[in-house]
Amino acid sequence: MVLQAILSNASHPEYGQLTVPLPIPASEYEHIMEMLEQIEIGSAVKQDCQVDEIQGGWPALCRMERTAVNIDELDYLAKRLDSFDDYEKAQFQGMAERLQLHGVDELISLTFCSQAVTVVTDFNNAAAIGRRHYLTMNEGVPLEEMQRQDFREIARDLIEGEVGRVTPFGVVYDNNFEMSQLYDGRNFPEYRYESCVMEVEMCSRFDSEEAPGTTLYLPLTQAQIERAMLRAGIDNYGDMRLRFMESELPDAIDVALDMEHESLGALNEMCAAIQPLSREDVAKLGVVVSFAQPEYAFQIKHLADNLDLFDFAPNVQTPEDYGRYMIQESGRYEYDENLDEYYDFAGYGRNRMEHESGFFGDGGYIAYHGTLSLDELMMEDPSEQNLGMKGME
């Protein structure tokens, strides 16, 4: 938790206050939205939450007190601030004070450009000041170049040649700072706060191809999806266009998906099924997908749900590899390395393959031992169609 906001309904103070931890934990998101709804605030699109108090180590944000904010904007701002180190914190707060910013939209944009300013909090070490300023002005400096710099001279030029503005967070040197309005009030700039399975961009099908979209980090809760749709001005799933951005999945899964024919609900359910899997099981799923050749996300979800029906021998590419893996590494046999020359690894591997439905993929060998055919295993349950898609249509 970065901070806490005490929120209320300015039109109905008698409804009381709600203390919201920020960033909002994913496990508490839907509950907090329900609590806000009870006091008739928390709109996905309106700035209807009055900030009565900001608690935490960000005094510059107290300028938002007694103003109205949008809860999702406030949550996004907290996520951005959570990544800041102590110096970035001083840069952000110094410039927020220097520019007298109090709007949450302005503060969101500031998080992307405040790193361009220099803030001095201690004038006792000129070399440290010069080094910090040089690194602020020059990204990715090689060590050899750093060693050639006279940081005391750089600090002297900064202090004597530039105008510094005193703030409670240090003396701020603007460095010809330009405020970029990266947040347009609708689509949050791309920023992955937590690990996710897949990133997709959501746009209205009525928007042009060049129009900015809303980035979704799957899986999400249904409430998060619906609020993102409202922010994007999308009334129903039929008006949505999806663009694949990137994923943490094997290439075989990415290639199998056709975004023009996928639904957000099916993609989200697929990602929710994959997220709890170990790295090894995700690699296994990639080979299973190459074997089963699914065409839709819901089919990949069914494969992920039934991974235990597949045996996986990683990095195996030949019958001999397979036989060696089964005898030496699978744990099914007591292997004696002193008898290694007497084992017929290739023969044993071929024998097993003759009695099972198997496949050599890029990541290893997969054998399916389920009772259903693969088509039946991947078949969508009609009762699950459009699951999680209700309420917005």
Image (tube, rainbow, N blue to C red):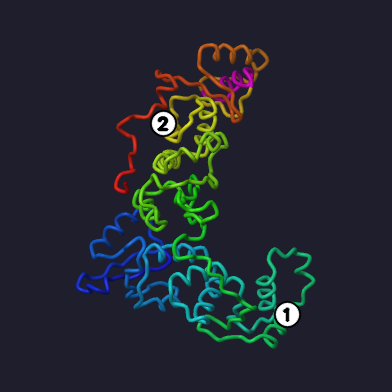
Q: Residue furthest left?
A: 14
Left or right, 133 with respect to 290, comes to right
Say which of 118 and 211 sits in front: 211
Decide: is 133 above or below 78.
below
Query: How crowded is the residue under tag 2: few (<14 C-alpha within 10 Å), some, or many (20+)?
Result: some
| Residue shown at 53% from the left, 82% from the top | 98
| Residue wearing tag 1 | 154
Under circle 1, the secondary element is helix
Q: Which residue is mark 2?
A: 302
116 vs 228: above or below: below
Count of numbered tags:
2
Q: Is residue 322 located in the magenta-colored stretch of the structure?
A: yes
Q: Secondary structure at mark 2?
A: helix
Identity, as a three-letter code, of the amino acid under mark 2: His
Question: Which mark lies nearer to you, 2 or 1?
Answer: 2
Q: Classify mark 1: residues with Cα within 10 Å, few (<14), some (14-19) or many (20+).
A: some
Q: Is residue 232 above or below residue 61?
A: above
The image quarter in which residue 59 lies: bottom left
Nearer to me, 381 or 348: 381
Residue range corresponding to the magenta coloring: 318-331
Identity of the amino acid at label 1? Ile
Mark 2 → mark 1, Cα distance in angstroms: 61 Å
Q: Position of residue 315 (x, y in %)?
A: 61, 29
Residue 311 % position (x, y):
49, 24
Q: Is residue 11 above or below residue 23?
A: below
Estimate the x, y position of residue 22 in percent, counting from the top left.
39, 64
Give the quadrant of the N terminus.
bottom left
Magenta stretch: dominant SS?
Answer: helix
